[in-house]
Structures are given as structure tokens and as C-alpha cells.
């Protein structure tokens, strides 16, 4: 089993406005991108389960060949900087993706 | 339309954040190469609603002055305009005043005379109330409709204006334009659009340049970036000779901080990158073609407003005892039960909110954390936000002392549960604001949306 961190070049999260955190997984080559896409392990369902969020909270999930990238976003439970927020910039929410199985 | 210069190329050098710094050599290289515009963003909604709510600048005055001094001097020497949007971080009138004051001081220090246009995009509450009544305000990423009550609660409201709102100011050909809250793309694209350059390419170039050198590699450190716009393409290149723009760095940048990397919605319409083509024309430069613009049926601008949530008091400490660490959920519930009991009749629980940030367990990710195994020690941050600073202080102190001595199953250490690094342990953190308006408003006349002041 290869985790996402073993094949992707960039795995990051960041605010896309104060109410949404967006996640990017960028691959270094078309082969790596296609391998992960074909393996079918990194899916909308897999990331929803990983973050424990409902289908409604998950905004988009797509493979983008032009950038060799996967992108999805999650609605924040608390908006950026409001009481109870834990990550104002949303920049440290990517970590669980590192260990997500990407290739069998 | 403004007459263009004859070579059919519009060159922009862009700084991603006023006050974040950039190498002086990069600016010199850009000016040496020849530019038509120095563009600079100064704002962001990333750091939360505090800056809009409080009216305080997001970047220090000292660093703002440093960057501004270099940019205004270069603009004067090359005799090209300098456009700065989202003044002061949040772009309210207070933020615009802050930046205009510094700009005037810098001009005096430099001993140069430059004309200054000021564009304000703070909104009159009545305009927003009328738009709500006319059903011209639309729900956006808050997923909740805007109510007149939200308008009353907001400390101030700004509109993130688009390129069209810059045009009345730019027709006066000011040497310097300082704008309130604005689409970051407008700083780069508004002027070439006025000169008739194609919208899809100009806006796409703006979207790439607006974060400065983030679209170049290596990304280490804030730096400038250069764009060359023509009628059928644009070229992106770093100003630092040690950096390079690659197809990857440029195409991947459209992913950054947005939910849809192909259709980029902004004031007045959408930039469509589905037909964009990226070509590496030499080792450091990327050429982009094929980006299109689809005007929206209704011109929409984003409104931003921030309200006061209360006043924060916090306390930081750590726990090392394994039995404590294991039972942190129960211990927290017990602390809150004690607070309610001991403060009955003194402090109403509805006047404050208390959060425990538990570093080593789920302090970074909260409910999104899939790993539920605690580390061998926990960092605990007690976070109290109350309706008055006094009440926040009382609740925080009580929560701290209760946490220190509260009992739990299997406790062997009866002298105290928490290691506090500081004395005093508690800190007043001031007012807390959050975005309570983040909605889209229909605008009939975008050119008349912002208020223009021409200064001598």
C-alpha cells in the first residue's frame, strides 16, 4: 500500500474565504496522477469519511488533469477567527491526507 | 478608453501583500525591464473578521511604510502608476485613512509630488438594507440569508469592488490609487482593461500575479512577479533571476485559496480557464493563451461585515499525568459543571463561551481530527469569550483553578493537575470579531459603487 504522501508532490489545505477550507493534492507527473486516479482509492467518499463530514459539508471533489491535481473543499464548522476556531488560516488541516491509501 | 502605448504590450509588476516585504533587487529588475504599472494587494479575509471589525491594520505600520516607500519611489522614478487595493487589510474607511496617511508621509519624506486618487468601498448600511428589502442580496458561503439584524450588528460593511469600480478613478490618470476593499485582481487588470485588453486574459493574469511570486519556484520568501499582457496572450516571469515560472507553478497557482480552479467567479462574471493553454517559452517564463470571460447576467459584488463576538481571556497549561490525559473529555465536562454550580447567581452561562483547545489530541483539527489517540502530554488552552472583558477574566480564572484541582478517576497526584508556564497564568486577549456578512449583492452601476476622492 502506498499512502498519498508517498506519491503526491504537494498536499495542502488553506482557507478559500472565511467559511470554507480547500484541499489540494498535486502530483509531479502525469503517470503518478493517472495511477492514483485509476486506483480509485482517493475518492469523495474516502475523504468525507477521513474528516468525518457529511456529503453536504464536502464541497466538490475532482481530479483535474490540466494541473495533475485533486481538489475538494469542506465547509468550516466555525468561520475563520470566530470563537471556537482552531486554525484561522486553515493551513494545518491537510495532515490526515498524508496517510490516506492511494495505491494498492 | 485610455490610449495605449504603441508596442501593444502592458507590463505589470505585482506585490502580493503590502508590508510582507520583497527584495529591493526584484523591484529594480522590474523597473529596468520596463513596466506600465506597479500593482499591490494589501488585504485578505484569511486572518478572520478581527481587522474589519476593529478597524485595525493587518500589517504593521513600519513594514507597510517600508514597502510603500520603495513602491512609490519606483513609481515616481519610472513615472508609472501605483495601484494598491484592500488598504489596511480589510479595506474599510478607517483602513483607507491609515494607508493614505502613510502614503502622504512617505511622499513628503521622499520629497516627490504625485497625484493621489482615493477610492472608498465601505458601504452605507441603508444601501445594504434597501438591497435586502429588494431581494438583491444573495446567500453565499455562509449558507444563510442576510437579515437586517446582521446589518445592525456589523461594526462596518465593505464591498469587494471589481475592475469597473476602479475605472472612474483611473480615467483621471492618477499617479497613485489607494482603494478600499477590492478584488485583488482589479489592482492588476483594471488599467489594462480600460486600455482595451481582452478581459479573460487580463483577469487570468491578475489572478496569477495577485499573490506575487507564489506562482514561481522556489516559493521561499515574499517577492514580486511580472506579467506581460498582449491581445492574444500573456507571459508570466519572476523578477528574481534565481526563480523560475514553470507550467506547473503557473497552472497550479489557480488552485490556491479557491474552491473551483477552472471557473473563477468574480465581480461581474467568471474567468473560464477550461480552454487555457500554458507554454514554457524559456526556462523562466510561461505563456498563457485561451482564457475567456463570461459576463454574469447580474453584476454581483461580495459584501463583508464583521460583528463583535465578545472579549477573550485565555490561559495556557499542560498535563503530563497519563490518567489525566486519558480522561480529558470527562475532566472538561466536570470543570464546566463546577463553573455552573459555583457561579450560579453570579455569572449567567449564556453570557460566555468556553473552549478547551487540546494540543496533543485534537487542538489543531477539532471535530475533523480522525486520530483519537492522545499524545503522552497535552497542551491545554482555555479560551473564554464573554460579553464583557471582566466576565471573561472571572470565568477564565475560575476554569483554570478548577482544572488545576478537579478530581478524576485513579488520581494519584493530588497536588495539582496542570503545569502552567506563566505567572500570571491568564491573559486578556481583547475583543473578538467574526464575519457575520459574507454575501453577494446585485449592483446596477458598478462604476458608481465606490466613492472617489481626488487629492492634489
Image (tube, grey):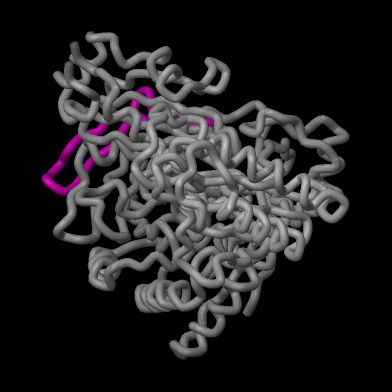
Quarter of the rendering occupied by the C terminus of chain B: bottom right
- On the question of residue B293 being in view, the answer is no
Relative to B269, say whether B126 is above or below.
Answer: below
Q: Nearer the viewer, residue B22 or B321?
A: B321
Q: Reply yes or no: does residue B281 show up in magenta.
A: yes
User: What x and y, as percent, mark residue A45?
Assistant: 42, 12
**Would residue B336 appear left or right of B293 to someone viewing this image?**
right
Seen at 59% across and 48% down, the residue is: B406
**Would residue B295 appear left or right of B151 to someone viewing this image?**
left
Relative to B385, say whether B360 is above or below.
Answer: above
Within the image, what quadrant is residue A64 found in?
top left
User: What x and y, as percent, mark residue B455?
Assistant: 64, 76
Q: Which of B192 and B337 is in front in this view?
A: B337
**Would residue B243 appear left or right of B314 to someone viewing this image?**
left
Relative to B149, say whether B3 is above or below.
Answer: below
Magenta region, residue range: B270-293
User: What x and y, as percent, mark residue A91?
Assistant: 41, 43
Seen at 38% across and 26% down, the residue is: A71
Seen at 47% across and 42% down, the residue is: B324
Relative to A4, say whether B162 is above or below.
Answer: below
Q: Which secondary structure type mostly characterizes the magenta part of the structure?
A: strand
Instruction: Please count the marks in the image.
Output: 0
Q: Reply yes or no: does residue B5 show up in magenta.
A: no
Seen at 58% across and 49% down, the residue is: A81
Q: Which of A74 and B370 is in front in this view?
A: B370
Amino acid at each position: 500500500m502506498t499512502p498519498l504522501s508517498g506519491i503526491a508532490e504537494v498536499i495542502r489545505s488553506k482557507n478559500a474565504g472565511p467559511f470554507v477550507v480547500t484541499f489540494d493534492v498535486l502530483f509531479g507527473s502525469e503517470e503518478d496522477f493517472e495511477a492514483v486516479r485509476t486506483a480509485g482509492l482517493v475518492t469523495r467518499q474516502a475523504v468525507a469519511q477521513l474528516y468525518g463530514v457529511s456529503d453536504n459539508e464536502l464541497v466538490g471533489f475532482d481530479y483535474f488533469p490540466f494541473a495533475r491535481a485533486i481538489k475538494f473543499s469542506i465547509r468550516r464548522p466555525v468561520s475563520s477567527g470566530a470563537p471556537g476556531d482552531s486554525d484561522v488560516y486553515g493551513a494545518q488541516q491537510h495532515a490526515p491526507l498524508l496517510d490516506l491509501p492511494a495505491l494498492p | 478608453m485610455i490610449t495605449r502605448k504603441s508596442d501593444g504590450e502592458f507590463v505589470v509588476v505585482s506585490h502580493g501583500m503590502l508590508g510582507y516585504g520583497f527584495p529591493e533587487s526584484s523591484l529594480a529588475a522590474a523597473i529596468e525591464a520596463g513596466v506600465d504599472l506597479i500593482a499591490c494587494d494589501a488585504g485578505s479575509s484569511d486572518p478572520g473578521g478581527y481587522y474589519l471589525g476593529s478597524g485595525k491594520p493587518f500589517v504593521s505600520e513600519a513594514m507597510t511604510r517600508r514597502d510603500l516607500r520603495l513602491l512609490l519611489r519606483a513609481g515616481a522614478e519610472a513615472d508609472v502608476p501605483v495601484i494598491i487595493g484592500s488598504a489596511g487589510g480589510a479595506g474599510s474607511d478607517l483602513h483607507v485613512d491609515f494607508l493614505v496617511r502613510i502614503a502622504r508621509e512617505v511622499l513628503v519624506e521622499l520629497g516627490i509630488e504625485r497625484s493621489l486618487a482615493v477610492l472608498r468601498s465601505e458601504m452605507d448600511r441603508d444601501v445594504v438594507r434597501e438591497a435586502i428589502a429588494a431581494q438583491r442580496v444573495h446567500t453565499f458561503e455562509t449558507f444563510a440569508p442576510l437579515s437586517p439584524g446582521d446589518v445592525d450588528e456589523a461594526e462596518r460593511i465593505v464591498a469587494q469592488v471589481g475592475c469597473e469600480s476602479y475605472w472612474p478613478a483611473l480615467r483621471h490618470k492618477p499617479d497613485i490609487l489607494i482603494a478600499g476593499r477590492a478584488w485583488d485582481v482589479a489592482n492588476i487588470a483594471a488599467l489594462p482593461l480600460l486600455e482595451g485588453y481582452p478581459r479573460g486574459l487580463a483577469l487570468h493574469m491578475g489572478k496569477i500575479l495577485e499573490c506575487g511570486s507564489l506562482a514561481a519556484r522556489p516559493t521561499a520568501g515574499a517577492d514580486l512577479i511580472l506579467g506581460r499582457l498582449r491581445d492574444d496572450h500573456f507571459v508570466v516571469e519572476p523578477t528574481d533571476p534565481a526563480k523560475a515560472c514553470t507550467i506547473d507553478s503557473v497552472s497550479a497557482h489557480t488552485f490556491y485559496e479557491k474552491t473551483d480552479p477552472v471557473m473563477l467567479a468574480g465581480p461581474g462574471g467568471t474567468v473560464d480557464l477550461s480552454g487555457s493553454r500554458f507554454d514554457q517559452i524559456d526556462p523562466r517564463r510561461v505563456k498563457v493563451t485561451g482564457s475567456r470571460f463570461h459576463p454574469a447576467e447580474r453584476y454581483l459584488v461580495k459584501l463583508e461585515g464583521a460583528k463583535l463576538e465578545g472579549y477573550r481571556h485565555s490561559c495556557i497549561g499542560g498535563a503530563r499525568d497519563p490518567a489525566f490525559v486519558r480522561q480529558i473529555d470527562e475532566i472538561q465536562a466536570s470543570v464546566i459543571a463546577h463553573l455552573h454550580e459555583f457561579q450560579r447567581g453570579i455569572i449567567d452561562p449564556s453570557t460566555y463561551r468556553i473552549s478547551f483547545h487540546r494540543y496533543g489530541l485534537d487542538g489543531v483539527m477539532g471535530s475533523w481530527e480522525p486520530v483519537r489517540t492522545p499524545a503522552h502530554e497535552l497542551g491545554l488552552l482555555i479560551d473564554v469569550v464573554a460579553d464583557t472583558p471582566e466576565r471573561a477574566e472571572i470565568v477564565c480564572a475560575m476554569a483554570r483553578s478548577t482544572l488545576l484541582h478537579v478530581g478524576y478517576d485513579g488520581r494519584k497526584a493530588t497536588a495539582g493537575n496542570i503545569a502552567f508556564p506563566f505567572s500570571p497564568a491568564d491573559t486578556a486577549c481583547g475583543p473578538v470579531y467574526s464575519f457575520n456578512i459574507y454575501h453577494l449583492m446585485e449592483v446596477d452601476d458598478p462604476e458608481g459603487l465606490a466613492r472617489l476622492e481626488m487629492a492634489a
